[in-house]
Amino acid sequence: MRRSRDLILLLVMWSVTTAFEVTKAVHVDDTAHLEIARAILADPTHPMSGLVNWADTAEPIHMTNQPHLLFYVMAGVMRAAPGHVEQAMHLVWIVFSGFAIVLFYALARTLETPSPLLWTAMFCLGPAFIPSQNLMVDVPLVALWLAFFLVLTREDAGGGILAASVLAAAACLVKYSSLVLLPILVLVIVRRRQPRRLTLLLIPLGILVAWSVFNWFDYGGIHIFARPIATAAAPGLMRGLAVIVGRAALWLVALGAIAPFTPAFVRPLLSSCKGRWLLAATSVVAVTTSLIGRAMLPAEPVVQSVLRGLFFANGCLVAALTTRALRSAREERVPDSASPHSHLEIWVVATALFIVVFSPFIAVRHVLLALPAVLLLIARGRDAAQVSRRGWIVACGLTIVVGMAVGASDARLADLYRRAAPDLASRFCHGGTRCVAVGHWGWQWYASRAGLETYDRERSHLHPGDRVILSELAGKQVLPARDSARFNLVAQVEAPSTLPTLVRTIATEKSSAQGDRSGGFYYFWTSVPWTITTRPLDRFLVYEVGSR
């Protein structure tokens, strides 16, 4: 009876997440991934030698960051469903979402986590998971990670290390951040005192070597060695440490933005002296961070400064709850370095360090990789045991409300370009007028399908009478003076905000310092992962090219 009930509830959760994904428009990096898949279809043995325009001009694909396992899957779907590429692709990604949900629940049950369904809901219905279900690689990747830790955790899995090695290899070919799984695997083998199983590391290492040889055959380089490391760009030890500290703070901001369940812990924390001090400290952090934001970024909206303070303080609180849960677990159990419960601690610490030190930037999807372990650690802690039934209703309710608000708004923003591209083309590109689109993300994909050329700084030759349509939000290219000096504004089309887009995943439209968008859910530095705003979703500028 219990299994049937749990299965039904898991299917309900999957159905809810599916509702946000199944019809979602191509969004943000989806377009680049689809273009890479097209290049694979054109020449599957030289996938990185093709060109993709994802900055100012078309560049070789090996300049991008990701390995290609999932892009080969996308290419296969394109070939199998040529007339329904987007729909078929979403169906494949929905399957990955289902695997992630089931695997999280299975891991929670294996670890004997109290209320595993509740924590599964807070994982998959929250503001990290729902919007991340684009055609990007992050939800499939977290599914692979959950499978990796599940097979390591199950004591009765005699082939656990073998299966984990295969899963780690697959994850590394999805995203290089999965390299962190290899030292974790080594540590687990050493803790279990099974040195002979270290030979199984030859599976992921061999796959990476084979992939690198394939890269050399493809374009004459090794892709994994050419990836940028943000901290390496800071000369000197002190500057490098300063960058790491700053990025760690951003990691906490992202964590706080996707963990709205913490109000449920206020009452239990107030019952102890240490808990009261913790709440007081986080309150001070929230106010101080907001004031610093106002002082350093006076041009940003007040709501964004306040949210940054709240997110950072909440991230610190989540980190403190995680630490307190670890301490209580050590006090209540006989220490056992080989215990499967220790995997969660390794998971959080190793992933956070890897992302902070090596990733090119900080984004919510980077924190999503550690979120399952954070949730499961907190769920098993002493503080969680003191949360009342009403508190859990509040925690789950807040998580679902924020998750759906962020997910719905992000879907509306993605859909904007699907609707705007054919509309703008019909209004301004009739009568044989040549039209060129400036901007990437979903705008690039749908503008191309509507018959507009993608602007290329080096290759596009504009002639008098041509029309150029620029998306202010997605148009990050640097336009050379030879072209921009000839632009004559014809029209300005604004996409107004609506109630479902009050919560916004693109936090700022323009940076006051550089006149460029400074990100949000998908990457951020001076902005926040999501914000509240009534500004227009985007603004399209239509130019006609004049003579010199």
Image (spheres, rainbow, N blue to C red):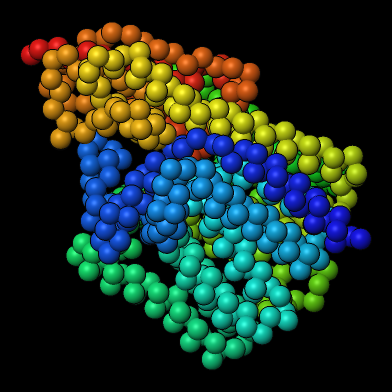
Q: Is residue 347 above or below residue 186?
A: above
User: Where's residue 131, x and y in %?
Assistant: 58, 40
User: Where's residue 330, x and y in %?
Assistant: 76, 68
Quarter of the rendering occupied by the N terminus: bottom right
Q: Nearer the viewer, residue 19 or 305?
A: 19
Res. 120 visible in picture: yes
Q: Is residue 69 left or right of residue 141?
A: left
User: Where's residue 266, x and y in %?
Assistant: 81, 40
- The residue that appears at 15% across and 23% down in the rendered structure is 462
User: Where's residue 400, x and y in %?
Assistant: 73, 38
Q: Nearer the viewer, residue 65 or 257?
A: 65
Q: Is residue 238 left or right of residue 180?
A: left
Q: How many marks?
A: 0
Q: In which quadrant of the rendered view does residue 374 lie?
A: bottom right
Q: Nearer the viewer, residue 80 or 384?
A: 80
- The residue that appears at 71% across and 75% down in the rendered structure is 154
Q: Is residue 405 left or right of residue 46?
A: right
Res. 323 visible in picture: no
